[in-house]
Image (cartoon, rainbow, N blue to C red):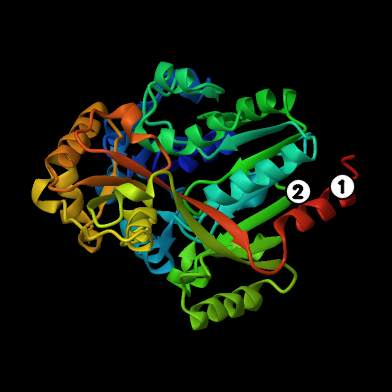
Amino acid sequence: MRTKVIIMGAAGRDFHNFNVFFRDNDDYEVVAFTAAQIPGIAERGYPKELAGGLYKKGIPIYPEEELARLIKEKHIDQVILAYSDLSHETVMQKASLVLAAGADFRLMGTQSTMLRSIKPVISVCAVRTGAGKSPTSQKLLDILKRKGFKVVVVRHPMPYGDLNKQECQRFARMEDCIKQECTIEEREEYEQYICCGSVVYSGVDYKKILESAQKEADIIIWDGGNNDIPFYKPDLHIVIADPHRAGHELTYYPGNVNVRLADVVIVNKVDSARKEDVELVIKNIRSVNEKATIIKANSVITVDRPELIKGKRVLAVEDGPTLTHGGMAFGAGVIAAKKFGAKEVVDPRSHAVGSILKLYEDFPHLGSVLPAMGYSPVQVEELEETINAADCDTVIAGTPIDLERLLSLNKPVVRAKYRIEEVDVRLEDVVEEWIEKKKLR
C-alpha cells in the first residue's frame, strides 16, 4: 500500500519537494497539490511530462480551502506543508485542520529536500519577505565579480504559467523575459540581474537547473524567495533580518529555520528602525545561533529623478509580495517620498479596480500604497488602469522592475531603489575569508 499524500503549496517549494523526494518514490502516491497565496494557480495541474512515470495523468491542483474535504474523500494519510512566510501560529492552525480531518501533518527538512552542487553555493535568504534579500544578493554579486569569479544566480521558483515551458528557464537578456511571458513578480527578481550582466535561472525542476547552472558558474548564488530555506545545500548561508518586524525571527516559518542555519545574519534597515528593535533582533538571533557573524546594515534609498518628488503629490507603487503576505504597510516608495520631500502620498484605493481592489479587502493593512501585482495579463491591465486613474503628479516605483517598460502610463515614473550599507562588519571581508577558507583562488 502506497502512502497517500497531499502537498500544500504555492507553486514553488511544493513542486520542488515533489521532484526531489516523491516523484520516483513508489512508497508514496501524491494524490493532489493544494494551492494558496498565488491567484489562479489552483486552475492548473502538475503536468504528466514533469510528474514522472508513476503519474501518467499528472497531478491535480485544488484550492487549499478544499483540503479537509480532500483528506476525507481521498483517504489521505499525510499532508505536507510546503510553502513559506507563515507565522508559527498559522502553521499550527493548518496542522490542526489536517489532524482533525484524520491525516498526519508533516514538514520536510534539509536532508530530504536540499540538492548538492559540485560548485560552491552562497545562499541569500531571509526571516521575512521584504527584509532586503535583493540588495544583498546584488552586493554579493558585485563583490564576487570584482574578485574575478563567474557567478550565476539561481532564483527561488515562480512558475505561474505553463509549467512544461518553465521547467528550466535561463534569463540573460530583457528579451528573455518577454519571450517567456514573465509576470511582474518574476520581472521584479530577474531584471536586476540582467541589467548588471548576470545570468539568472529559475523554473520548476531544480535538479535540471542546477546541472545547467554548474556548467557556466564558478560560484552559484541562491536567491531565496519569501523566507524559504535553500533548495541547494549552501557553503555560505546569509540570512537577512528586519528590525521593523522585530521578533519575527523567532515566530515565523521557515524564517526561524534560516536563522538557526545561518553563517551570517545581516540585521538590515538599522537606519530607519528603533534602536531597541535592533537590539531585540540581535538578542533573538543569539538565543538560537551563537556562532553566526552578525552584520548591521543601513538600507539606503536612492531615486533617479528626485526633482519629480519634491513638493509633488505622489503615488507609491510598492513590491507586491512584500506588502501582501509579507505584511508590510509600506516600502521603498513611501520612504523615498518622505526622504525627498513629497507634498503628499495619495491614496489609490478609490481608483482601484478588479483584482487590485480586492487586494485592499484581503489585506486591510495596506492603506495608501499600491502593490505592484501582475500575476496575469488581466491583473497587469488592472494595475495600469488603477495607476492612470490616480490623482497624482508622479509615480514612485518602489518595485525593482521598470514599470514604464511594461505599462502605458500617463504620469512620470521615478524609480526608488535600496542598497545595503554595512555599519560595522563588512560583507566583503566575510566573503574574502570564506573564499580563502574554501581555497577558491
Cβ atoms at labels 2 and 1 below 8 Å apart:
yes
| Quarter containing the C terminus | top right
Label 2 vs label 1, nearer the camera: 1
Instruction: Note whether residue 421 is visible.
Output: yes
Spot occupied by residue 296 in the image (x, y as percentages of width and height): 62, 68
**Occupied quadrant, residue 240:** bottom right
- The total of numbered circles placed on residues is 2
| Sequence-first disc among 2 and 1 | 2
Q: Amino acid at mark 2?
A: Asp
Local SS, label 2: loop
Residue position for label 2: 235
Q: Residue at x 53, y 70 (%)?
A: 270
Q: Is residue 7 above or below residue 257?
A: above
Local SS, label 1: helix
Q: Is residue 128 left or right of residue 212?
A: left
Residue position for label 1: 438
> Residue 1, which numbered label?
none
Spot occupied by residue 341 in the image (x, y as percentages of width and height): 32, 61
Q: Residue at x 66, y 23 (%)?
A: 212
Per the model, the C-alpha gap separating discs 2 and 1 is 9 Å
Q: Amino acid at mark 1?
A: Lys
Q: Residue at x 72, y 61 (%)?
A: 426
Residue nearest the viewer, comparing 172 with 197:
197
